[in-house]
Image (tube, rainbow, N blue to C red):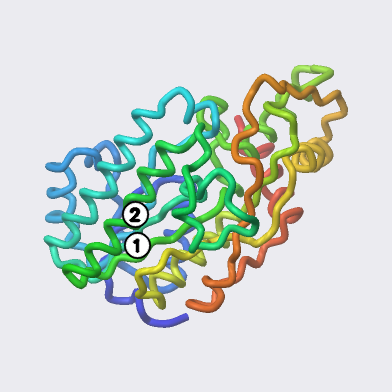
Amino acid sequence: MSSFFENKRVVVTGGAGFLGSYIIKGLQKRNCTNILIPKIEDYDLVNINDIVRMYEDMRPDIVIHLAAVVGGIGANREHPGEFFYKNLMMGTQLIEQGRLHNIEKFVAIGTVCAYPKFTPVPFKEDNLWDGYPEETNAPYGLAKKMLLVQSQAYRAEYDFNSIFLLPVNLYGPGDNFNPASSHVIPALIKKCVDAIEAGDDYIECWGTGSASREFIYAADAAEGILLATELYNGSEPVNIGAGFEITIKELVEKIVKLTGFEGEIRWDSSKPDGQPRRRLDVSRAKEYFGFEAKTSFDEGLKETVKWYKKNRK
């Protein structure tokens, strides 16, 4: 561990959330004693006045911007306008005020949803501009991708040190299991456990099961983000992933086995699959700041199921 964070004031937007909890633990492990979390009750980060007040109250050296309005395919389809506006306004205003307040570094967290719908697999960072994102989450993905444009523009004009990271889908203990807004892994775990408790003899899954996804354990993603914060000061976007893919059908079968659900799996092919395939090229993160994901997918899934069964009440 380096002493990079020891005397730094670090603001973590979204620090009270899922990934945020792992970032906070990682910062504490690195002996960071000035960790500041702007709570939504105190600062609405879509509102410019609250952002200015946050900077003046907290006086950060570094901002790690995790806060986002997010959800699965269903939430993205229902709220495309809200997801675009809130994510764009949060990010662009936080970066602009960071520049005006002369902070040392801004860490912008993008999303795998920024990639074009038919990106060649594995997704290389240089492919980011080769097409339009998958339609169901394009507004969210594009709002986040604008932070890359802003980061690069501000570095060029103002020498502002802003980096842009692209994490793949996260999972792990403490995930969001609310069916209205959860992503695929927590949604499926909840579905299986609820079906067992209710005595249901089948579960229903969206799409055909043929789409593939890559997932990274949240503790690994947090480690990648913190390594980049310490060691990376460049303008190029960097993927944060585990470098593997699994079809949704295979994922469902793993979760069914781990939860002990013994009923039928029914596929609703009238619902969208989303992007056909997702797997990141993770070589840049390894080259630029030595990051590699450590947690095996089976082990991470097991821990996530265990956590949900213990904490769901």
- Callout 2: helix, strand or loop? strand
Residue at 29% across, 39% down? 40
The foreground one among 303 and 122 is: 122
In the visual, does 158 lie left or right of 307? Answer: left
Residue on which the image places disc 1: 107
How far is the residue under mark 1 from the one under mark 2? Answer: 6 Å
Residue 43: quarter of image: top left
Label 2 amino acid? His
The foreground one among 25 and 176 is: 176
Cβ–Cβ below 8 Å for labels 1 and 2? Answer: yes
Residue at 34% across, 29% down? 82
Residue 126: % across, % down: 49, 63
- Label 1 crowding class (10 Å Cα cut-off): few <14, some 14-19, many 20+? many
Residue 211: % across, % down: 70, 40
Residue 128: % across, % down: 47, 55
- Callout 1: helix, strand or loop? strand
Residue 184: % across, % down: 63, 37
In the picture, the quarter occupied by the C terminus is top right
Is 298 rendered above or below residue 208? below
Residue at 74% across, 34% down? 209
Outermost residue on the bottom side: it is 2
Label 1 amino acid? Val
Q: Would residue 84 be visible to someone looking at this image?
A: yes
Residue 65: give its label: 2
Is 12 rendered above or below residue 267? below
Residue at 76% across, 39% down? 255
